[in-house]
Amino acid sequence: MELQNFDTAGFLRDSWQQQPLLIRNPWARWDNPIEPDELAGLACEDEVEARIVTHGVDGWRLEHGPFPESRFAELGPKEWTLLVQAADHHVPQVAALIEPFRFIPDWRIDDVMVSCAADEGGVGPHFDQYDVFLIQGLGKRRWQIGPKCDDASPLLNHGDLRLLANFEATQEWVLEPGDILYVPPGFGHNGIAVGDNCITYSVGFRAPSRSELIGSWSDDLLEAMNDDDRYGDPDLEAQANPGEITSAAINRLHAMITEKLGDRAAFARWFGQYNTTPKYPEMDWQPEDHISETEVAELLASGEALRRNPASRFSFIRQDDGTTLLFVDGQEYQCSGAQAEFAQQICGHANLVADARQASSQQTVQMAAALINKGNLAFDQGD
């Protein structure tokens, strides 16, 4: 799927993380990837994160799945929304919606959430801390956009939903199938279904907070430290006032922290693992039958294509010495030569046919076999 006549450079310059943008049906042909009944079926599965938001005389209500099939028969004709998180992990056609937006780095991608709403259904006015492309799949939805919000913006007193208490729309559009609305972080927005079977795809892009980075990076550093690494001052001299913490002591103490936190190479390796940690690490995608390196070598040499598991996260970092660090679902692989070329290409493409140099590389074959047996890759043989 591709966006037609879409000015990527202009979008990144004028809209990305700056202001909302309505994009009227930019597809050569729009085909809705999933039907309401199929989405409801996903919401009944144990391994799928699903929610139902209803609105009535008693206010807003949130329910968590998995849901029994009977729950959908109990829902009324209006004001309810089914939300299924990470539908791209389970439905390849939904995963394909990410491809047109890969001018944004993959490490920023979160997932594709799918919502199906009855007439007047929605989740209420709210704001997010991430960028999102809202693609209308079926039916119509009225989107209202408000001003930018932050942590000081008043919220309704609700234990489960972070809904804006004083939402006032400044822009409003009705989206039809194929239309896209981009909403940057912080902008209040409210989507309301116009009619039944309103399906919307939310392609979300995550952004770590400073506190999240510092906290998680520090936690990782602490695991490798020992109690013997302590402050020392063998050059200590007598002070005029023993109550003073001198500049020399502060400098030494500060250096004990910043030397560790400031190790860029160590941070890069940590972040590659941290950022590619699966959204649902408890999920096991390993194939029932493992493949041997010999089989992998033969299939690569014969030109069989590899495809990535949409639920797996792939990223790479170039090293100063010319090698490549590949990160897949939190695991690190050090690569060089043909193996590094393979690693970079599989990060850039959902499907890959290895060239002759890569297929004949023992390191490439070993890594490909490991990734296949972990469920990160699979040969695209029509299975």
Image: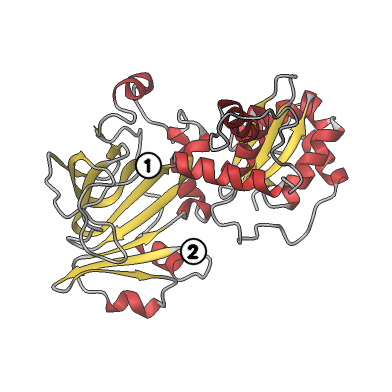
> Is residue 98 something one can see in this rendering?
yes
Q: Which residue is mark 1?
A: 130
How packed mark 2 is, by other alpha carbons closer than 10 Å (few <14, some 14-19, many 20 or more), is some
Q: Of the residues shown, which amino acid type is indicated by label 1?
A: Tyr
Q: How is the image coloured?
A: secondary structure
Quadrant where the N terminus lies? top left
Helix or strand or loop: what does disc 1 sit on? loop
Q: Of the residues shown, which amino acid type is indicated by label 2?
A: Val
Q: Provide residue 38's location: percent of width, then percent of height.
A: 42, 63
Q: Earlier in the sequence, mark 2 or mark 1?
A: 2
Label 2 to label 1, Cα distance in Å? 22 Å
Residue lying at 35% horizontally and 43% vertically, measured from the top left: 129
- Whether 278 is drawn above or below 116: the answer is above
Residue lying at 37% horizontally and 58% vertically, measured from the top left: 35
Say left or right for 280 vs 44.
Answer: right
Residue 48 marker = 2
- Whether 94 is drawn above or below 244: the answer is below
Q: Nearer the viewer, mark 2 or mark 1?
A: 1
Q: Nearer the viewer, residue 151 or 86?
A: 151
